[in-house]
Image (cartoon, rainbow, N blue to C red):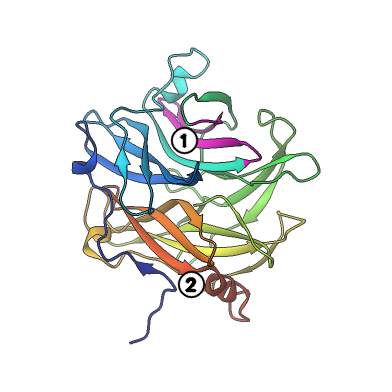
């Protein structure tokens, strides 16, 4: 049987559900991921019973069976510099390691809209906020794990709310606070599988061929939106330059747990871990209700990005 996707879903998906959280909540979804002290670590977005999101850590020895902390780790701030902008929740985290520091980007959601927040930790105990890096409306922020010419590089998705266009942009900063030199990185394609809007999914993964970037694309249909995942390769020295991308999505909602939930027809990855054998484990939210995991060979993804039909 032909398989249109290079990904293989874990046979016991979803790997984390509401019932796996050791306190009352509505749902768990859209998790960041990293390795920390020889453990797989997920930073879960959990929606409470009031509809506000916070972030909680889960840990695993095998990347499949996770133990969730008994209380949240990152909650909306009471600091007056942040509180108005995080009042409705902190959402959709990503983790990028630069040297010994783990930087966490997240969506700060408040009465004025969505902004991208940046914080850091070295031990996953203490979390220090650094900045609100964007104005509203902006989300899907991911940091590169390396600096370029002594500058940090951030991918974002300004717009995309209320039917507005939403494309992927790239910006540069000397200090993670002040951002500029912004330019368009990728735009959605009218009439295609990502004709509604785009957004970066997982922090770029360095390969010999280029920076591998997974992104989600949204298509508007007569019965609602469909969230699917594509991949692109960015130049190793010039991260604003796209050198290839997949012609079609590489992961989309097919299984019942991806089709049915609080927000149907959604696969939404925020974290991945590259294993030594070249397998990439992608952790993704399903239908804004649970978390699933799928694996692929990274070489297969790169091949799709560089195929003559992909450009």
Please, what is the dominant secondary structure of the magenta stretch? strand
100 in magenta? yes
Q: Residue at x 38, y 80 (%)?
A: 3
Dot 1 lies on which element? strand
The span from disc 1 to disc 2 (Cα, nearest Å) is: 27 Å
Whole-percent x and y of residue 215? 51, 57
Q: Residues within 10 Å of mark 2 (few under 14, many from 20)?
A: some
Dot 2 lies on which element? loop
Return the residue nearer the eye: 84 or 67.
67
Disc 1 marks which residue? 107
For residue 19, side relative to residue 281 (left or right) = left
240 in magenta? no
Q: Residue at x 39, y 25 (%)?
A: 75
Give the magenta part as a residue range.
98-123
Whole-percent x and y of residue 48? 26, 31
For residue 252, side relative to residue 264 (left or right) = right
Residue 248: assigned label: 2
On the rendered image, what quadrant is the C terminus found in? bottom right
Vertical comparison of 66 with 5: above or below: above
| Residue located farthest toward the top when viewing the structure as drawn | 80
Vertical comparison of 124 with 260: above or below: above
Res. 13 image quadrant: bottom left
Q: Is residue 192 visible?
A: no
For residue 123, side relative to residue 258 (left or right) = right
Q: Residues within 10 Å of mark 1 (few under 14, many from 20)?
A: many
Q: Is residue 218 visible?
A: yes
């Amino acid at each position: 049987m032909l398989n249109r996707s290079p990904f293989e879903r874990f046979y016991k998906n979803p790997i984390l559900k509401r019932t796996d959280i050791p306190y009352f909540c509505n749902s768990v979804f859209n998790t960041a991921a990293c390795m920390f002290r020889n453990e797989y670590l997920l930073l879960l977005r959990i929606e409470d019973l009031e509809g506000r999101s916070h972030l909680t850590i889960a840990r695993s020895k095998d990347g499949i069976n996770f133990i969730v902390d008994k209380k949240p780790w990152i909650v909306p701030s009471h600091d007056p510099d942040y509180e108005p902008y995080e009042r409705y929740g902190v959402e959709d985290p990503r983790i990028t390691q630069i040297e010994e520091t783990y930087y966490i980007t997240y969506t700060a959601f408040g009465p004025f809209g969505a902004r991208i927040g940046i914080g850091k930790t070295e031990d996953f105990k203490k979390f220090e906020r650094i900045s609100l890096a964007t104005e509203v409306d902006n989300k899907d922020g991911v940091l590169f794990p390396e600096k370029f010419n002594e500058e940090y590089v951030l991918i974002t998705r300004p717009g995309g709310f209320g039917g507005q266009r939403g494309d992927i942009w790239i910006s540069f900063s000397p200090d993670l606070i002040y951002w500029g030199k912004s330019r368009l990185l990728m735009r959605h394609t009218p009439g295609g599988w990502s004709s509604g809007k785009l957004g970066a999914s997982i922090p770029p993964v360095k390969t010999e061929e280029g920076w591998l970037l997974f992104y989600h694309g949204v298509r508007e249909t007569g019965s609602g939106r469909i969230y699917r995942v594509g991949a692109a390769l960015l130049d190793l020295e010039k991260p604003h330059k796209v050198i290839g991308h997949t012609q079609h999505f590489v992961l989309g909602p097919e299984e019942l747990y991806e089709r049915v939930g609080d927000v149907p027809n959604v696969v939404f990855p925020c974290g991945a871990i590259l294993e030594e054998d070249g397998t990439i484990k992608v952790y993704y939210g399903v239908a804004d209700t649970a978390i699933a995991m799928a694996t692929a060979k990274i070489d297969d993804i790169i091949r799709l990005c560089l195929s003559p039909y992909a450009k």
